[in-house]
Image: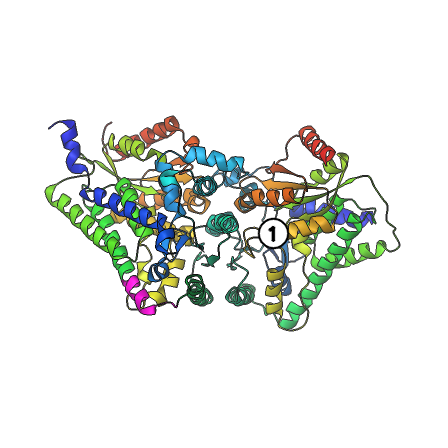
Amino acid sequence: MERIVEEFKKASADPIAYGRALKEDGRKIIAFFCTYTPEEIIHASGVHPMRLFGTTRDSSAADRHLQAYCCSLVRGALAQALSGELDFIDGAVFPHTCDSIQRLSDIWRLNTAYGFFADVVLPVKLTSASARSYFEDVLAKLRSDLEKGLSTRISDDDLRASIRTYNSIRASLSELYGFVSRGASPLLPGDVSALVRGSMILERSAAERLLKELVRAHDGIGRKDTNLKRVMLVGGLCDHPDIYRLLLDSGALVVWDDLCSGSRYFEGAIPEDGDPIANLAGRYFERAVCPAKHSSTTARARRLVEAAIRERVQGVIFLQLKFCDPHAFDYPYLKETLDSHSIPSMLLEIEDQLPPEGQLLTRFETFVQTI
Amino acid sequence: MSAADSEKPRKFRAAKRMREIMTEYYIEAKGAGSTGKKVAWITSGGPVEPLIAMDVIPVYPENYGAMIGASHMGGDLCAKAEAMGYSTDLCSYARADIACARENGGPIGGLPKPDMLICCNNICGTVLKWYETHARYFDVPLFIFDTPFCHTEFPDIARKYVHRQLDEYVAFLEEACGRPFDLEKSSEVGRRSLEGQRLWQEVLDTAAHRPAPMTAFDAFFFLALIVTLRGTQVVVDFYRELLSEMRERIEQGVWAIPNERFRLLWDNLPVWYRLKWLSDTFASHDACLVADTYTTAWCGSMKYIDENDFFGSMAEAYTRIYLNIGVDEMAKTIFSMIDKYQVDGLVMHSNRSCKPYSFGQYDIMRMVQEEKGIPCMIIESHMTDERSFSESQTLTRIEAFMEMIRQRKGLRS
């Protein structure tokens, strides 16, 4: 098991090195930044879709283009693109989510030359029949943009094969997460996070195979009770493995999350028969939404409470990326809803660098002791 | 003539009328409970004409945000929102308005409660979150008019989507008002809306005259009507009156800045709580802000409106407004404004409250410098939260900027 987890950890800790190596093997790579990217379509074209987390030691290259009040994800991604760190990619795709990603797309288009470029201007409201049919139109447009841009053809069967791969990856991730939540795994929550993030980096057929192997390796492993408090993480992206470790040191186990580097990535299976584009669109209407999308005014809180009850969560930690408006807008309401269900929560504002470890540990310990 | 006398002719006659109209408007809106009229809260770039056609009173939290800012109440209200858990990095209009909705504080004792909410995301994603908050608090129906972002194009699939939403909007209004939509009346409203936009553009165009009879600060003031009441006859009559006053000024030689030497273009929303200070500071350099990208946005997509089919073409026009387009498209608009108004320098308000308006400004600034060769400067603030503004830093920047402009024109300070 260790060997497999290590592969995912390595890829998620240094996606650039992984991408470069893949490129040397002759693979084309298209980068993306958000789970609203219909990766399956890119994958079906034979190109490798790779998520970038904007994690970089130095985002100063972005200073000429973006104000200091832009989130570190967008600043980091642009800095990587401008500094040449991404010289291995063959293009990028920008789904419409938040205002910042939307402007990143413009600035990227005007200042970089990575070959393929596409805006995937998805609907924001995911409630109406017209939005559903527009969503399908947008996916079909991406398919034909990719076909033109890469001089290839993406058949329905290619798409169905890709959907099967992704369904398998998502199902395995979901199972593995469940093992860890139930205490029926030697893996740690930080490992599961690396598996999810690594699944967005690794060559997908390899990811599929390795994850299946990991699931099989859990056969016969019994449940072990622990005294650890059960906590849940809520926010956008969490590319900080240290958070999981420090929480463990504080006596808490992350048993579930609402993160786009977590459950929002792998929830929801796609039907494998029928019109693949319509099926792909369908998943986005059913999965938990990112707060930049609208499903209903109460859906996020309802799902949060349901998950907290289902996973017997004792405390919720909001990871608020500094300057991320959609999440910041939802926080007061989500917190209020948790309060009304007597579920304690804490807010941790994060930037590209975490606060000093000692300080963070103290905050976690204080929270964990109160729940 | 004393200093006070020389000020007199520069005051606009229309300002009094405008205040009267806005007062009447808010009195009517606040009295909606007793008249049985419905009140809809709507975003500033939202399709208001169907509301006017249905005799629903549109109320604009963003206009209210501007009032809050101008009355220096933003800091306190934003602090209240922060105590409720809203981050200080969020839009200050939204923070202040959310706090007001809960506390009934703010100017005019708060806004009248909404019967419905209309949110059009053509200006930002923030309005979606802001209106979701209101929808939960007031427990009223929310209609989202979802306008796909036009980075480089407005494809047919987007056209189809926004068209279908017009039908959904009509159905929503029929349900909310309990009566059928009157297409004939809506065409009439559409004609008046277009007429109002044309007149507003003509008013703004008068500042192309050298020297200019008005400044962007005047435009920020007179903007309120095209935002709140477009589609009504009052707006058409008012801007017609204002336009003739502007023309009169040009004939009589009444200039906004008596010794206008430099002409500047403003980008982004105003700094509502420092309008007078900024106006005086630029005036002290004989600089006139002759135009701005913000007030122009309410007449910038007229080219997409078919005057014989307002209703059929409005969805496209609302989707292709200034903020819902790519940075390079925005730069093109700025280039043409620089030419049209013969501008010597660009003042960009880097507005922490408005990320879609502000991210990309650095690129636009470089394009302007390369293409037009004029100096540019950045002023940073939160448009309605006066706690975020540094007067001394801004003053230093303005002085350095004006010095650059003078040098470029071969003038000594």
Three-letter residue code for mark 1: Arg
In the rendered structure, which segment of residues is drawn in magenta?
A: B180-191
Say which residue appears at 63% left-offset and 32% top-offset: A355
For residue B147, side relative to residue A56 (left or right): left
Task: State which quarter of the image contains the C terminus of chain A.
Answer: top right
**Residue located at (31% from left, 33% from top):** B278
Where does residue B120 sit, x and y in percent of width and height? Answer: 43, 55
Name the subunit of mark 1.
Answer: A
Mark 1 = which residue?
A300
Res. A8 visible in picture: yes
Residue A178 rendering spot, x and y as whole percentages: 77, 52
| Left or right, A127 with reference to A308 | left
Q: Nearer the viewer, residue A235 or A110?
A: A235
Give the x, y percent position of residue A121: 50, 59
Nearest to the observer: residue A157 or residue B391 = B391
Residue B287: name its quadrant: top left
